[in-house]
Image: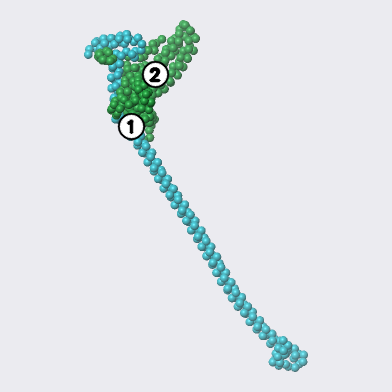
Chain colours: A green, B cyan
Amino acid sequence: MADPIEQFEIHPLPGMTFGEVNVPVLGNQVIAFTNSHVAMTIAFLMVVLFLTAVTSGAKVVPGRLQSTGETLFGMIDGVTDSIIGHEGRKYFPFVFTLFTLILGMNLLGMFLTFTATSQLAVTITFAMLTILLVIGVGILKHGLGFFLLFWPSSAPLLLRPVVGAIEFLSFLLRPVTLALRLFGNMLGGHVALKIFAGFVVSLGAMAFAGEGLGLWALPIAALSMTMVVALTALEFLVAFLQAFVFAVLATIYLNDVVNLGHGH
Amino acid sequence: MAAPESTDIHGGTTATTEAESGGLPQFDTSVWGGQIVYLLFLFVVLYLLISKVFAPRLRRVMDERATTISSAVATAKSVQAEAAVQAAAAKAEVAEARAQSRAMAAAAKARVTEEANARRAAEESEVNARIATAEAAIGQTRDAAMANVGTIAADTTQAIVERLTGTKVSAADAAAAVKGAA
């Protein structure tokens, strides 16, 4: 059976390796244009093409494509507007970029053999970018008052240090959960798809060769095929949902620092 | 960079990738840097495109749509109000016309009755006058006839007396006798 993990391997394109660099945290780095770069580029270009097509001939009475684009736009606009409030528009481009890029990569993974968002490096980049923006906005807006985020003024005085420590810990875990949620969802979905698809082929081959289970393998292969179809549908939903969840969580974290101390 | 060199490095990287992938290939950090830098680059480009081009364009269209709709609604409202005013005016006009025609009808009726009354009165008076004349004429005739009755009676008396007695009676005597008998 095909290795379900193989699809996540990073291969430089032939003749596109440019050398190695030593970076402090990550160690030796291979500089190359890999299949991951290809997937990211295609996803990026599709997002740009889609948004160009949506906005270039934008009419007051929208067509189908424009309606789709406006729905996505309005959805994220509604999220930033309802969660952050009147300052939401300022952060809309960031959240919309996150959303469209993740959605593009997730959906592209349904058509290619490689999914960029199933790479930990990619999801960690998105998560770190989000959390660094949160910290940056917090410190720029409130200075040291940013640390009031971890000071639960509504809790009893005696409990405040404890609750504050928990708040701080949960804040540190935010980028981790952001990165791992997207990574895990993409990884799990594509592994499951590959395993069931592998069943179909290997059990089918077994049946036709007359080895092992023989013809009894056919119903199991058919069942696996049903699972593949069902999982594919589910993965499309997950692809959209995870992009949306990432965008909503990023907005919520941004709101924490934008409206710090305004009470929620 | 020479081609054989790069293929050497290529071979080396796949070797390290496979060597370190005891678990998932995603945990091989030697390929993280390139992905992270490239993704950051794509993210920044897309962010700039969205914030400078796509979002303003879509917002403009959406705002335009909102103003179009609100202005259309306002126009419709004003037209509706105008229509309501016109309808009220038409209603008032109809009511006025109805009242006018009613008044006119009443006036006509009054005039007609008045005329009829006047004509009747005139005719009545004429008839009365004629009756009076006729009565006067009848009275005259009767008086004349009555006057003639005496003469006739005297004549008759004269003739009867002459036939019976053969004596001629004077007209005056006969008249006196008739008067005395009456």
Q: Position of residue B127 (x, y in %)?
A: 59, 73
Question: A154 and B70: which one is in front?
Answer: A154
Q: Which residue is mark 2?
A: A185
Q: Residue at x 43, y 18 (%)?
A: A231
Q: For the residue carrying disc 2, how many other residues have a C-alpha within 10 Å: few (<14), some (14-19), or many (20+)?
A: some
Residue lying at 72% horizontally and 86% vertically, measured from the top left: B182
Element marked by disc 2: helix
Residues tagged 1 and 2 counted as in contact (Cβ below 8 A): no
Q: Is residue A69 visible?
A: no
Q: Which percent across, then down, holds residue A222?
A: 47, 14
Which of labels 1 and 2 is toward the front?
1
Q: Which residue is located at x 36 percent, y 12 percent?
A: B24
As drawn, is B56 to the left or to the right of B170? left
Describe the element under mark 1 as helix, strand or loop. Answer: loop
The answer to whether residue A169 is seen in the rendering is: yes
Residue at x 40%, y 45% (from the top left corner): B78
Q: Amino acid at mark 1?
A: Glu
Q: Amino acid at mark 2?
A: Asn
| Residue B52 in the image, given as x and y percentages of width and height | 29, 30
Q: Chain of mark 1?
A: A
Res. B63 image quadrant: top left
In the image, B140: left or right of B17?
Answer: right
Residue A164 relative to residue B135: left or right: left
The numbered disc on residue A87 is 1
Residue at mark 1 to residue at mark 2: CA–CA distance = 31 Å
Return the mark for residue A118.
none
Q: Quadrant of the N terminus of chain B?
A: top left
Outermost residue, left direction?
B1
Q: Residues within 10 Å of mark 1 (few under 14, many from 20)?
A: some
